[in-house]
């Protein structure tokens, strides 16, 4: 496992933007983001491999979010635009060796960062 440290969450109004950052203590092929809202199941947001050959988003994203990586820094970012109240959740950074839509395939998780979108 690697240590993951997230930053960038906060409170934003509907239609606003936030950029989440996550830095890993070591390199992993796949990095991405999941989220969990109160009373709801954990949900895949986005993930990508080092090469970018596997990059995918949750169906709800609909072009509003962009994931990117800085491989040299072992970092992954999530630019979130056009935020909606339903995007309110704790966002978790994840890392693993294989790209997957399944949370179980990621062995390393960050502590989570709260994103709150007010209406």
Image (tube, rainbow, N blue to C red):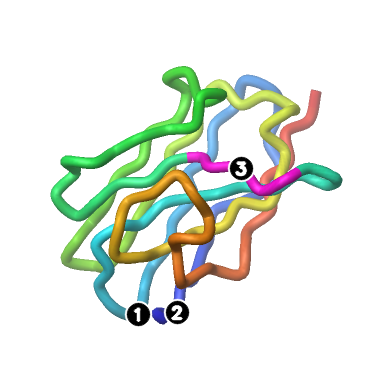
Question: Which residue was labeled with disc 3?
Answer: 43
Question: Which secondary structure, mark 1?
Answer: loop
- For the point 45% across and 44% down, the residue is 101
- Crowd around label 2: few <14 · some 14–19 · many ≥20 (10 Å): some
Residue under label 2, please give it: 3
Magenta stretch, residue numbers:
41-45
Position of 32 relative to 107 (above/below)? above
The magenta stretch spans residue 81: no
Q: Where, quadrant-wise, is the N terminus in this rendering?
A: bottom left
Alpha carbon separation for disc pair 3 and 1? 24 Å
Discs 1, 2 touching: Cβ within 8 Å: yes
Which is more toward the observer, 51 or 78?
51
Instruction: Answer whether labels 3 and 1 touch (C-beta < 8 Å).
Output: no
Q: How far across and how far down the image is residue 94, in percent?
A: 46, 61
79 shown above or below 82? below
**Image coordinates for residue 28, horizontal then vertical, percent:** 27, 68
Image x and y of residue 13, in percent: 71, 28
| Whole-number angstrom distance, CA of label 1 to CA of label 2 | 5 Å
Main SS category, magenta section: strand
Query: Disc 3 or 1, which lies upstream in sequence?
Result: 1
Quarter occupied by the C terminus:
top right
Residue 40 image label: none
x%, y% of residue 79?
43, 38
SS state under label 2: loop
Q: Depth-wise, is mark 2 or mark 3 nearer the camera?
A: 3
Q: Secondary structure at mark 3?
A: strand
| Residue drawn at point x = 53 percent, y = 39 percent | 18
Q: Residue at x 45, y 79 (%)?
A: 3
Mark 1: few/some/many CA within 10 Å (<14, 14-19, 20+): few
Q: Is residue 116 left or right of residue 79?
A: right
Per the image, the residue denoted by label 1 is 25
What residue do we see at 72% from left, 38% from top? 88
């Amino acid at each position: 496992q690697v240590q993951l440290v997230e930053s960038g969450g906060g409170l934003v109004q509907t239609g606003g933007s936030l950029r989440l950052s996550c830095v890993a203590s070591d390199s992993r092929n796949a990095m991405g983001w999941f989220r969990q809202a109160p009373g709801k199941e954990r949900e895949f947001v986005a993930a990508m491999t080092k090469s970018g050959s596997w990059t995918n988003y949750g169906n709800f994203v609909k072009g509003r979010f962009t994931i990117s990586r800085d491989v040299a820094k072992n970092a992954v970012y999530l630019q979130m635009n056009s935020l909606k109240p339903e995007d309110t959740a704790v966002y978790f950074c994840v890392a693993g060796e294989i790209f997957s839509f399944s949370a179980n395939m990621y062995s390393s998780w960050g502590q989570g960062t709260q994103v709150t979108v007010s209406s």
